[in-house]
Each structure stands twice: as structure tokens, then as C-alpha cells.
Image (tube, rainbow, N blue to C red):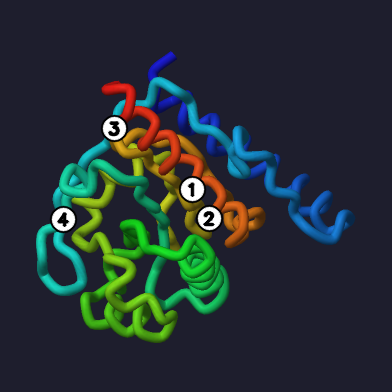
Amino acid sequence: MPARLRLALFVTGLIALAAVAGVLLFALGEQTVPGSASFAGATRPPDIPPADFGVRDENGRMLRLADLRGKPVVVTFLYTTCEETCPLTAQQIRIALDDLGHDVPVVAVSVDPRNDTARRARRFAREQSMHDRMRWALGDARKLQRIWRAYGIQPQSANAEHTASTILLDARGRQRVGFAASVLTPEGLAHDIALLEREQRAGAKSGA
């Protein structure tokens, strides 16, 4: 089965599991972050190839994932006029970085290119206290479609909400961990970033 098809099926299943997980987390009262050897988020299929892209950010600068290799990268999918899920996601990421004690690259990929202007993207970042901590991937639908497909994302439309996912890439640019918005927590995200950083350091020491 092609990797993209399996990724689409994986994301669909993840959304269903997230609904069940949300009920369980509500019943338990809090999310338990696994031990240091386990990811808090859902691990992605292992054979998805790194998906690079080159688009402009909110300041007109070229944004390439290849330039961010060597450390974990947070990739999330937002739109600037969102009033609930997207601001909450941005805040979860901000708190995770604060808890981690240092920043890692954060890329917010537009899922509503018609309305996600550079001005609105800059305003969103300021309002969420993510100015200089997050870069937007902007462009027309044709350019962004390649990114959406690579990450199994349904964009925002008049008939459907976008796939609210936050994905962690490892130092080699591979998709490793995914969080649906309903189960994303600062503790879980910070934990998984730290785990990928330890993995990267261990690999560097061993020469892998």
C-alpha cells in the first residue's frame, strides 16, 4: 500500500482514537506522560519519507524544512481567523517550549490560504505570544497542497474543519510523532521534543 495512502488511513484512525482518548482523559482528570523511553503522542508510520518544501513565511523569507535539520521541528496546521482550536494549539506549543526551557523550530502551515495573509499571520503570532518563535508557511493552495498531502491534512473549507494535527519531526526531518488537537498537552509535547533531542545526541555520539 502506498505510504501516502497508509498515512491518510493512519490520520483517520488517529482522529477516531483521539475522540476515545478525550473521554478517557476526562475521566482520569489528567494525561499521564509515559516514561522517558516512550512517546506521549502517537508514533507515525516508520517509512514515510521526509517531506521538504520551500514556501514564503509571513515576513517574505524563504522557509525550507531542509534548513531546519539537526534538531526536532514542530509542524502544526492552523489558520489565522480561527477563534478556538488554533489559538489553543498555539498556546499549548508556547507553554511546551517554556517548559522545555529553550525553543525549537515551529512551523505553522496555513490551511486557509485564501484568508491567511502575511499581515494576519504576523498578527496571530503576536496575539499568541509566538512572535519570533513560530514561522508561518504561506502560499497559494497549489503550493500548500503538496504539504497537506505529505502530512495527511484536510485543509479548512466551508464544508469541513481542517485536520487539527501537530506533528514532530526528528533531526533528520522524518515524521515521528503526531498529536490530534484533542490530546495535545504542553507536558506531552515537551516530553516528546526532549526525547527526540536525547535520541539525536545519542546518535551524534555514536556517529549514526
Quadrant of the image containing the C terminus: top left
Identify residue type, mark 3: Pro
Question: Residue 88 appears in which quarter of the rendering?
Answer: bottom right
Q: Does residue 145 appear in the picture of this structure?
A: yes
Q: Residue at x 50, y 41 (%)?
A: 195
**Relative to 158, is 127 above or below?**
below
Residue extending farthest right:
27
The amino acid sitting under disc 1 is: Ala
Q: Nearer the viewer, residue 52 or 176?
A: 176
The residue carrying mark 2 is 190
- Determine the secondary structure under disc 2: helix
Q: Which residue is mark 4?
A: 55
Tell me which numbered mark, 4 or 2, is placed earlier along the sequence: 4
Q: Are marks 3 and 2 in contact (CB under 8 Å)?
A: no
The local secondary structure at tag 1 comes to helix
The residue mark sitting in front, 3 or 2, is 2
Disc ID at residue 183 = none
Residue indicated by mark 1: 194
Tell me the residue that label 3 is attached to.
Answer: 50
Of badges 3 and 4, nearer the viewer stands 3
Q: CA distance from mark 4 to mark 2?
A: 27 Å
In the displayed structure, would residue 113 be above or below residue 189? below
Q: What is the three-letter code of the residue carrying label 2?
A: Ala
Is there a contact, CB below 8 Å, between mark 4 and mark 2?
no
Callout 3: helix, strand or loop? loop
Proximity of marks 1 and 4: CB atoms separated by less than 8 Å: no
Between tags 3 and 1, which lies in front?
1
Mark 1 and 2 residues: CB-CB less than 8 Å, in contact?
A: yes
Q: Position of residue 159 (x, y in %)?
A: 50, 60
What kind of residue is marked 4? Answer: Val
